[in-house]
Amino acid sequence: MDRTYKKIELVGTSTESYEQAIRNAIEKAAETLRGLAWFEVVEQRGHITDGKVVEFQVVLKAALKLD
């Protein structure tokens, strides 16, 4: 079966880890988008305060399967 996807960009954040930032982005997007099929991480970064990592950030490309 042939498939067609639309790719969107998401930015997820977490105070815990990059993995949790990914999960936060996907789970939040899934609340309003249907057909989420896969993702790829295209960028990772973080925020530093007083010499400590306080936030993990990821930029994702997520694909939605089109009907």
Image (cartoon, rainbow, N blue to C red):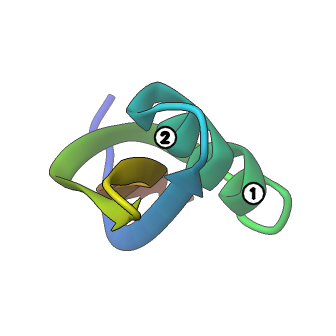
For residue 16, what is the image quadrant? Answer: top right
Q: Considering the numbered disc 2 on the image, is that residue within a helix, a strand or a loop?
A: helix
Q: Position of residue 23 (x, y in %)?
A: 60, 35
How crowded pointer 2 is (Cα within 10 Å; few <14, some 14-19, many 20+) is rated as: many
Q: Name the quadrant of the N terminus.
A: top left
Among the two numbered marks 2 and 1 on one chain, the one whose residue lies closer to the N terminus: 2
Residue type of the residue flagged with mark 2: Ile
Which residue is disc 1 drawn over?
28
Label 2, label 1: how far apart the Cα atoms are:
10 Å
Q: Residue furthest front?
A: 50
Residue type of the residue flagged with mark 1: Lys
* Residue in the foreground of this view, choosing between 50 and 22: 50
62 versus 7 height, above or below = above
How crowded pointer 1 is (Cα within 10 Å; few <14, some 14-19, many 20+) is rated as: few
Q: Considering the numbered disc 1 on the image, is that residue within a helix, a strand or a loop?
A: helix
Residue depicted at 49% across the width and 40% down the height = 22
The label number, if any, that marks residue 22 in the structure image: 2
For residue 18, what is the image quadrant? Answer: top left
Q: Position of residue 31 (x, y in %)?
A: 85, 58
